[in-house]
């Protein structure tokens, strides 16, 4: 959940979660990343886990390696955008402003920094963490945290610092890639999203994409169970390849397994998603998304007119000088 500063509102746009459950060691690693509506003010994230976790902030390369597996990228499709421009018009009409910066470019949202703190299962560390960082919680959020603590879940606080690139906040801020490793008996994830203060009319929370990597196929306990948008086996070599692309993995699961991914609605109440073993599923892979690469070519009208005039001048100068071929007298 998001804990903003008083008077601030930070909207959670998307959430990506990957659960790696190792039945041999009885551990689970949760890799999670969020996207927020643009803000330039630091805010807090509170991540619940079933047991005290070991927390690490990972590289963006890990997110790309995982996402490329669930959402394969297709071939490059190249297009040419040819436009005629005017040098004189550019001098007469000048654009106002410097254009979008890298932080404002929606195609590449900037990444935020993170500082984590273990808050445990008692309410006092959470209160001290909120006061020391100047964050606040709404009534619905406090109620949800009390319910999770009552069943033994532990909390981790994350101070998210958006990149300071000017006064205007970027439209989208991508949160840090966080990894939580803790003991577990089965894959589980706290998927509820209580409102910041009062619930919005008809608001169901942001979309949730959650995937599970373990030795077998899994399904959720929701009824009816959701259909996965990705289900396929991963060999130990595939897992090692993900690690090579990511520059290292925060989990110890290196053998053959099955990756199952869902796009699901957030559960109500305490909102804990639990995954159980299921029968093997036929391979389900999304259609690769093509990569569009546009090449822009701006041709000045004055240059085009000059080129045409040069061709006409050359033809008139050298074409007329040669003239028609003369006939030889016999």
Image: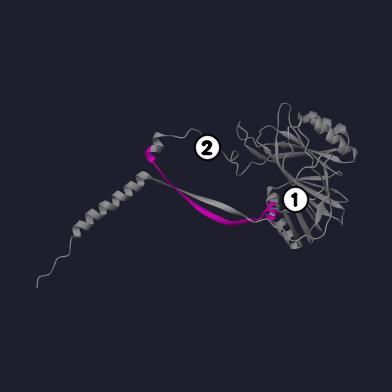
Q: Nearer the viewer, residue 102 or 141?
A: 141
The local crowd at label 1, few if under 14, some if 14 to 19, many if 20 or more residues have their Cα within 10 Å, is some
Question: Is residue 35 positioned above or below 280 on the image?
Answer: above
- Judge whether residue 244 can be spotted in this image: yes
Q: Which element is circle 1 on? A: strand
Earlier in the chain: of badge 2 and badge 1, it is: 2
Horizontal and vertical percent for residue 324? 17, 62
Above or below — where is 316 with respect to 166?
below
Location of residue 298 in the rendering, given as x and y in whole percent from the top left corner: 43, 46
- Outermost residue on the front side: it is 224
The stretch drawn in magenta includes residue 71: yes
Residue identifier under label 2: 99
* Quarter that holds the N terminus: top right
Residue interval drawn in magenta:
67-88
Report the residue that reaches farthest toward the bottom. Answer: 330
Which percent across, then down, holds residue 218?
81, 55
For image coordinates 39% across by 34% down, the residue present is: 92
x and y percent of residue 329 in the render? 9, 70
The residue that label 1 is drawn on is 262
């Amino acid at each position: 959940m998001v804990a903003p500063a008083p008077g601030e509102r930070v909207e959670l746009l998307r959430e990506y979660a990957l659960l790696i459950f190792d039945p041999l060691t009885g551990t689970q690693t949760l890799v999670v990343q969020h996207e927020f509506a643009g803000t330039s003010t630091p805010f807090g994230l509170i991540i619940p886990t079933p047991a005290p976790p070991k927390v690490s902030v990972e590289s963006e390369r890990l997110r790309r390696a995982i996402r490329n597996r669930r959402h394969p990228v297709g071939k490059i499709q190249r297009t040419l955008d040819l436009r005629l421009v005017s040098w004189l018009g550019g001098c007469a009409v000048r654009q106002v402003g410097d254009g979008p910066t890298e932080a404002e470019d929606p195609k590449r949202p900037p990444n935020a920094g993170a500082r984590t703190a273990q808050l445990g299962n008692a309410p006092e560390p959470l209160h001290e963490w909120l006061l020391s960082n100047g964050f606040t919680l709404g009534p619905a959020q406090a109620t949800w945290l009390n319910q999770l603590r009552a069943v033994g879940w532990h909390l981790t606080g994350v101070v998210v610092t958006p990149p300071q690139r000017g006064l205007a906040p970027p439209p989208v801020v991508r949160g840090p890639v966080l990894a939580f490793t803790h003991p577990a008996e089965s894959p589980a994830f706290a998927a509820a999203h209580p409102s910041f203060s009062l619930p919005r009319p008809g608001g169901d929370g942001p979309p949730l994409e959650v995937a599970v990597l373990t030795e077998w196929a899994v399904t959720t306990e929701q009824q009816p169970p959701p259909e996965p948008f990705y289900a396929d086996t991963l060999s130990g070599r595939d897992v090692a390849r993900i690690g090579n692309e990511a520059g290292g993995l925060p989990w110890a699961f290196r053998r053959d397994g099955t990756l199952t991914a869902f796009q699901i609605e957030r559960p109500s109440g305490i909102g804990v998603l639990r995954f159980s073993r299921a029968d093997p599923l036929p391979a389900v892979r999304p259609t690769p998304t093509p990569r569009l690469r546009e090449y822009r070519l701006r041709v000045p009208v004055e240059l085009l007119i000059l080129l045409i005039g040069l061709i006409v001048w050359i033809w008139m100068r050298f074409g007329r000088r040669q003239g028609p071929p003369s006939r030889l007298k016999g």
